């Protein structure tokens, strides 16, 4: 954030309900709609005429839906190694191999939520793993099972997809395929692992600044 702010941009990184420092709000009432509302309310509070939304990983679902809701207020949607939803999909449609397992676990235990994976699984270097892992929290299960509703009107914002080329791509195959098949999307690869925000902050910031400032 500091790198982007030093370049003259106003930056906000809202924490989604039930996660990180807001983990005390974790419950079965928290779902994808909650997270979409988090982003929309944060964007509206900025009172900015042109907003660039950046969604990472799961965040591609709520960020895409929020961009559709905000409409003309959004200048650009950037998905960083993220899932690109189609209307009516849920997050676990992109991970069918674990969908039934997660559904069974959620039904068996009313307090069960998605356990976090270690940062090592996402390419975070060893010296940073303890810092990251200490901040990981379970993910609200409702975020994975609620189906997204997208506005059917044509989008008016620019769309860019940043694929982290050092990260495994199996779960993102569907999303990347959609991007490459849609001329409205710009696509480029970042030589970084999935958590580029941590591992390659300068490369990521430089890339974001370059594409926010006009390149597709």
Image (cartoon, grey):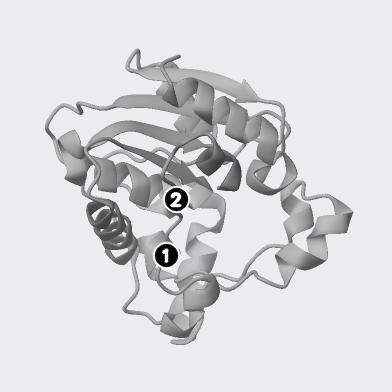
Q: Which mark is residue 192?
A: none
Asked which quadrant contains residue 36, the reply is bottom left
Q: Which residue is mark 2?
A: 59
- Residue 98 place in picture, x, y as percent: 55, 58
Q: Are marks 1 and 2 in contact (CB under 8 Å)?
A: yes
Which residue is drawn at the image coordinates 47% and 22% (left, top)? 211
The answer, for residue 166, to whether it is visible in the render is yes
Seen from the viewer's position, the closer of residues 129 and 110 is 129
Q: Badge 1: how crowded within 10 Å, few (<14), some, or many (20+)?
A: many
Q: Which mark is residue 16?
A: 1
Quadrant where the C terminus sits is top left
Q: Helix, strand, or loop for circle 2? A: helix
Q: Badge 2: how crowded within 10 Å, few (<14), some, or many (20+)?
A: many
Seen from the viewer's position, the closer of residues 118 and 172 is 118
Asked which quadrant contains residue 103, the reply is bottom left
Which residue is drawn at the image coordinates 52% and 47% (left, top)? 57
Q: Nearer the viewer, mark 1 or mark 2?
A: 1
């Amino acid at each position: 954030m500091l790198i982007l702010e030093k370049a003259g941009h106003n930056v906000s990184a809202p924490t989604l309900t039930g996660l990180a420092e807001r983990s005390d709000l974790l419950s079965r009432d928290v779902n994808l709609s909650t997270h979409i509302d988090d982003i929309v309310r944060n964007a509206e509070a900025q009172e900015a005429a042109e907003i660039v939304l950046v969604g990472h990983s799961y965040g591609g679902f709520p960020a895409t839906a929020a961009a559709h809701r905000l409409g003309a207020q959004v200048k650009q949607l950037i998905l960083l190694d993220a899932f690109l939803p189609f209307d009516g999909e849920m997050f676990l449609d992109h991970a069918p191999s674990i969908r039934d397992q997660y559904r069974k676990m959620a039904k068996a235990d009313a307090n069960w939520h998605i356990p976090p994976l270690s940062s090592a699984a996402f390419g975070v270097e060893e010296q940073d793993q303890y810092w990251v892992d200490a901040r990981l929290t379970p993910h609200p299960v409702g975020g994975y099972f609620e189906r997204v509703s997208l506005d059917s009107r044509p989008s008016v914002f620019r769309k860019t997809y940043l694929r982290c080329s050092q990260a495994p791509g199996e779960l993102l195959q569907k999303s990347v395929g959609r991007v490459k098949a849609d001329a409205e999307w710009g696509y480029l690869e970042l030589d970084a692992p999935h958590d580029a925000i941590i591992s390659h902050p300068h490369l990521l910031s430089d890339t974001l600044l370059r594409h926010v400032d006009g390149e597709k």
